[in-house]
Amino acid sequence: MAKRGAFFGESQERLDYVYAQGRRERVAEIVDLYPERICLENFDAHVDQLQDLEVIFGTWKISQLQKAHLERLPNLKIVFYGAGTVQNFARPMLEHGVRVCSAWKANAVPVAEYTLAQILLANKGFYTNIRDCQTYASRKNSPFKGRGNFGATVALLGAGAIGSLLIDLLKPFHLELVVFDPFLPAERAAEMGVRKVSLEAAFREGDIVSNHLANNEQTRGMLHGDHFSLLQNHATFINTGRGATVVELDLIAELENRPTLTALLDVTMPEPPDEGSPFYSLDNAYLTSHIAGSLNDEVVRMADYMIEEFQRYEACEELHHEVSLDTIDTMA
């Protein structure tokens, strides 16, 4: 007999976006799917029909169920979250004994791919070069060229799902990889072929410094002027992590004082930057609108990860994407 399942979420649009291209239909094939989307507003109206509910599927804007809700779902065993961070909903569930699985590793794939592209371009001097090629005179007068990728040093801040995948993607390019990550054991760093360094050394040594730190109380404001002042001339700072980890006024000051630096910012705090922010006018700051993570055709991969994870759960196999109270404190 199929396990009873339901989609929970505050946004039908988000569910339709992620569980697209036949993924919702696939969920309906593998569970006894409740016909209505459950949200906080209609929870009371449907909860009596959900007493046998065992499985929840969701994605961005999943309903933030609290202890009072969970106590009214006596058979709920597990949540399959077709998105990345679980920080805004998972803790009450885990504390109540409900298991949580997340597609955070699926979401790491496009971020790592995007960052790889930025790193390879930045080491070629692409972002400074295009500034130098906007007029005939500047184009004729020896535009800047980077050092190239062979032997360049790439400093990664964080070696979690994204950082680890990025390390694998960077290996064919003969780069020197250094990593700042207090949670990365030395033995694991050696296995990955990277050198562990301090945060200061990462900024000092990197031709590229790429931020993949988790966004939590310990990392907010962690990257500040003392670090940006260590950047080499013509270094590039990439942020696809979270804007809150950066003291952005310090970054702005360094970019203003040192026009040879480049910042590639896919995330900021706030997002987008406030009207009038210097980020909009600085020639050496490049803003994108949080496009590194899963978008458009990429998002269904997150649904696929959770459908496959459910099949492992149903077969009583080891789960690949489960999170716990011990692990969420170090996750983004």
Image: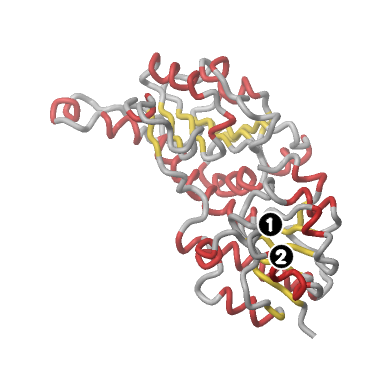
In which quadrant will I find the N terminus?
bottom right
Amino acid at dot 2: Asp
Q: Are marks 1 and 2 in contact (CB under 8 Å)?
A: no
Front residue of this view, candidates 278 and 130: 278
Kindly state the secondary structure of the residue where label 1 is placed: strand
Front residue of this view, candidates 151 and 145: 145
Q: Position of residue 231 (x, y in %)?
A: 50, 20
Q: Is residue 107 above or below residue 141?
A: below
Q: Position of residue 222 (x, y in %)?
A: 63, 25
- Residue 44 is left or right of residue 318, and the answer is left
Residue at horizontal 59 percent and vertical 38 percent from the top = 212
Q: Quadrant of residue 43?
A: bottom right
Amino acid at dot 1: Ser
Residue at horizontal 76 percent and vertical 82 percent from the top = 2
Front residue of this view, candidates 92 and 278: 92
Residue beneath disc 2: 44
C-alpha span from label 1 to label 2 = 26 Å
In which quadrant will I find the C terminus?
top right
Q: Residues within 10 Å of mark 2 (few under 14, many from 20)?
A: few
- The furthest residue to the bottom: 1
Kindly state the secondary structure of the residue where label 2 is placed: helix
Residue at horizontal 20 percent and vertical 32 percent from the top = 134
Front residue of this view, candidates 292 and 267: 267
Residue beneath disc 1: 102
Q: Is residue 166 above or below residue 283?
A: below
